[in-house]
Image: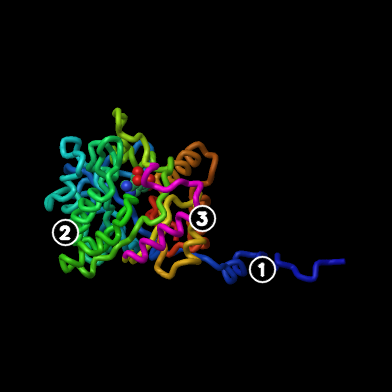
């Protein structure tokens, strides 16, 4: 006649819901991406990423101290490179006094315990907006590995704790690991963007860094020959397993919300920490909908972040890192 088991008893009020809740997020879960530019006193809002900014080094220092004070413990650095410093082989990326190298030192001086991870990829340095050297309409793999390896060494020498290769060239993790070890940088870790899809959700990020592939004849307009096809699942497992075999300390799934199936599957398959990247387009979508009054910003943000944890993420790279920590 009546239900024998009543699941609603465990949902009856917030106290019982708290008691039986399976997943929480804490400041320890987050990796805060930061965009750095040349200049002094610069804090430019990114048009397609409301309330997110490009910071000059002085403001980077302030921001990092604030983040640390709020309980965040890790940042992921990106730089916007001046046009006149871009070329086809990313020479500026290896400049020991380049913006990234100075940004790493700025963070470490301001906040020595803040974990510094750096994006390792050529695109912000590439005059073509690609993650590798372009030749005859192709993105060269092995020649690019040399640049990525030198770039990683340079970041590590400047003080980066982890390098985070986001390029999807074949063999990069092994090449970077060997390069670091040869320089005796044995304690520098590698967080690999191992399952990175060719996604249209990266648009606002490319605005932020002015790093989109350029529209020139004989230059590929997209990154589909190196980033993964979003229709594929097994490929993500293979890529991730390869990166672990080559020495990755942490692996990553990117983007986030549209790839929770991949995140869970990888979490079940591997025994290293798994990160997820809630990318710029995901941030932009929620900001836009909330601005229109169509979604409740904080509620939807929290629902998405909890979903990453529930799906198995150990680390969440998110532009909401600061917003969420304020709420906790
Ligand atoms: C660089 C890089 C990209 C992102 C992180 N590292 C852009 C791309 O691959 O085109 C995207 C991050 C975001 O959209 O938030 N290779």
Q: Percent position (x, y) of residue 104?
A: 20, 56
Camera sees residue 186: yes
Q: Is residue 311 magenta?
A: no
Q: Percent position (x, y) of residue 63?
A: 27, 53
Dividing the picture into quarters, in which one does residue 67 lie? bottom left
- Tag 1 or tag 2, which sits nearer the N-term? 1
Asked if the residues shown at circle 2 and circle 1 are in contact, with their CB atoms under 8 angstroms apart, the answer is: no
Mark 2 secondary-structure assignment: helix
* Distance CA(mark 2)–CA(mark 3): 35 Å
The residue tagged 2 is 158
* Distance CA(mark 1)–CA(mark 3): 26 Å
Q: Nearer the viewer, residue 118 or 224?
A: 224
Residue lying furthest right: 1
Q: Nearer the viewer, residue 48 or 119?
A: 119
The residue range painted magenta reads 224-246
Q: Percent position (x, y) of residue 319?
A: 38, 50
The residue tagged 1 is 10
Residue shown at 50% from the left, 66% from the top: 268
- Tag 3 or tag 1, which sits nearer the N-term? 1
Mark 1 secondary-structure assignment: helix
Residue lying furthest top: 217
């Amino acid at each position: 006649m009546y239900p024998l088991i009543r699941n609603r008893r465990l949902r009856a009020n917030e106290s019982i819901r708290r008691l039986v809740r399976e997943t929480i997020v804490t400041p320890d879960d987050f990796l805060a991406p930061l965009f750095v530019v040349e200049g002094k006193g610069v804090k430019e809002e990114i048009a397609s990423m409301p309330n997110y900014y490009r910071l000059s080094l002085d403001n980077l220092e302030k921001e990092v101290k604030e983040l640390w004070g709020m309980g965040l413990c890790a940042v992921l650095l990106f730089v916007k490179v001046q046009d006149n410093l871009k070329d086809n082989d990313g020479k500026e990326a290896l400049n020991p006094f380049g913006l990234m190298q100075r940004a790493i030192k700025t963070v470490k001086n301001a906040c020595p315990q803040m974990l510094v991870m750096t994006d390792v990829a050529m695109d912000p340095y590439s005059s073509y907006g690609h993650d590798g050297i372009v030749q005859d309409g192709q993105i060269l793999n092995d020649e690019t590995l040399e640049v990525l390896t030198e770039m990683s060494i340079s970041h590590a020498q400047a003080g980066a704790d982890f390098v985070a290769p986001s390029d999807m060239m074949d063999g990069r993790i092994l090449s970077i690991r060997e390069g670091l070890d040869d320089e005796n940088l044995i304690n520098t870790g590698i967080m690999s963007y191992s399952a990175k899809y060719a996604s249209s959700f990266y648009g606002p990020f490319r605005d932020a860094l002015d790093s989109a592939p350029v529209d020139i004849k004989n230059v590929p307009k997209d990154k589909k020959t190196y980033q993964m096809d979003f229709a594929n699942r097994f490929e993500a497992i293979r890529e991730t397993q390869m990166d672990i075999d080559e020495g990755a300390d942490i692996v990553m799934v990117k983007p986030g919300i549209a790839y929770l199936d991949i995140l869970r599957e990888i979490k079940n398959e591997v025994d290293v920490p798994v990160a997820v990247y809630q990318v710029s387009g995901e941030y932009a979508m929620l900001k836009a909908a909330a601005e229109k009054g169509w979604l409740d910003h904080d509620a939807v943000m929290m629902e998405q972040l909890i979903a990453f944890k529930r799906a198995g993420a150990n680390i969440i790279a998110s532009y909401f890192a600061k917003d969420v920590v304020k709420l906790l």
